[in-house]
Amino acid sequence: MSESGHSQPGLYGQGRRRRRRRDRDQGPPGQNLSGPSRDREYVPRERRDGSEEPAGPLLQKTPIILAKPPGERAKPSQSASLGGAPSLEKPIMLMKSRDEGGKPGTPPEMVPSAPGSGVAKLEREGQRPTQPVYQIQNRGMGSAAASGTVDPVIGQTKLLPPEKMKHSIKLVDDQMNWCDTAMEYLRDQTDMLVVGVIGLQGTGKSTVMSLLSANTPEEDQRAYVFRAQTQEIKERGGNQSSGIDFYITQERVIFLDTQPILSPSILDHLINNDRKLPPEYNLPHTYVEMQSLQIAAFLFTVCHVVIVVQDWFTDINLYRFLQTAEMLKPSTPSASHDSSGSSGADEGTEYYPHIVFLQNKARWQEFCPRNLKKMHMAVDKLMAHSHLKYKGTLSMLDCNIFPGLGRDYLETEVNLFLLPMLENEGEDALTRAGSGSSSTPLFSLLPGYRGHPSFSSLASKLRSQVLAMSRSQLSHTILTEKNWFHYAARIWDSVKKSSALSEYSRLLS
């Protein structure tokens, strides 16, 4: 009995040392102990380094360990390395560089962590992929932020005004080739108006387009955005414009000035300079007429408003030319998709612009209400079979030019507008009215009789009415300025390669 009694404490101490070694390697072994030894060994359990016991199943039995002062607790990294279990205390991350976090833009969950670190996952959860506020506000501003164009209230860049054009540029050159120089002035916005002009030689197309776009009658004509004919060109019967000129205002109105249709100066230039004609044209006059038809058909497809300028009333061949260009224009989708079944097939599938007949250099007799009524009736009968929108969008009666006339005076009011001759201020009023030949007026203090309002007031009223016209949809999709440019380039290419125009050219020759 004595030997067995002395052997028991030794065995018990030996087992206790084994359990302590196992505690350091595997954690609290409270489940493997039995009897009173479990209470004596585990209740006062503390680590030798003074750290708290990691959370475990026995956390509820020993809540006193949570009341230890923070100074006696070890750091999370030490606790994880000593105990082998992750700490519950969340680390605090102030800033983490991009070199440590991987490539810029990498999410924090995708950043690789060092192997063997027990707090790598908690570090990824605590990391915030943010940047300083000043970097976010100044991002993408570049030199705009340094130049003082940043709104101090919201910290964003102010919208810069569109670039202002100083003069017109080529959209189609004199060789009838498309030019891409206008692309840099266009923007990605849809609120635009496209205005084109056609007319015979010397009718004042470039002057009218300059007054509608950017200039005033008081300015020098040499500073107009569309160059007018010089005195030398007028004397030799030449033409100033060639091809199609492009100009866009800051109000996003696109103006297209064109070379004269059926121009004798262009025909004379082809004959006298022995210019080679394209192989599909045999005669020079056929080539000149086909050029004019191509330009007119192009404008009828890509413009909201087309202004037909003439300087005397009226040329029957001009209306035949307009109807021919309407017939040969390329087919385009309708601007409105809600066309009723009662409308014609052509009206439901084709786009047609507004057309305005501008009587330039009009005499005072043409402003007589009786003559004005006859002019409207003549234009209405000549355009009766046309699908072009030649009535209902422009009215001289709304301009307070004829205050004594009501709206019902003109039974068929077409888009007809009259502009008088552009005159100097010091010119004789009586001579302008055709009532005398003296160089001095009878009453110098009284304004001379004109028979019509001044040119400046009429030009201003014309501009306001043209710019107020409806901006219908040109194609089956809503076009931005840049999309319109590409759409116009495709239309011009299709016009030059049109089989209908080729067949018409063959019939002419």
Image (cartoon, rainbow, N blue to C red):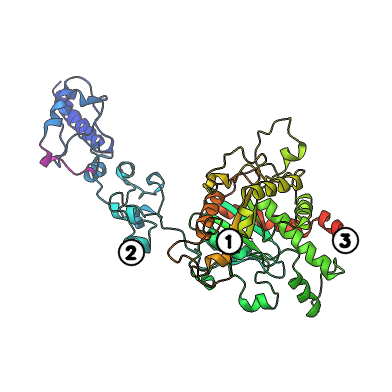
Q: Which residue is mark 1?
A: 209
| In front of the other: 54 or 132 | 132
Judge whether residue 70 is colored magenta: yes
Instruction: State the residue at coordinates (26%, 35%).
Output: 22
Q: Disc 3 residue type?
A: Leu
| In front of the other: 339 or 469 | 469
Q: Which residue is mark 3?
A: 508
Q: Disc 2 residue type?
A: Ser
Q: Secondary structure at mark 3?
A: helix
Give the image quarter of residue 407: top right
- Near mark 1 (Cα within 10 A), the count class, few <14, some 14-19 or many ≥20, is many
**Image check: 6 left or right of 142?**
left
Instruction: State the residue at coordinates (81%, 66%).
Output: 287
**Image check: 454 left or right of 201?**
left
Numbered badge on residue 160: none
Give coordinates of residue 17: x percent, y percent: 20, 35
Q: Which residue is mark 2?
A: 147
* C-alpha distance separating marks 1 and 3: 32 Å
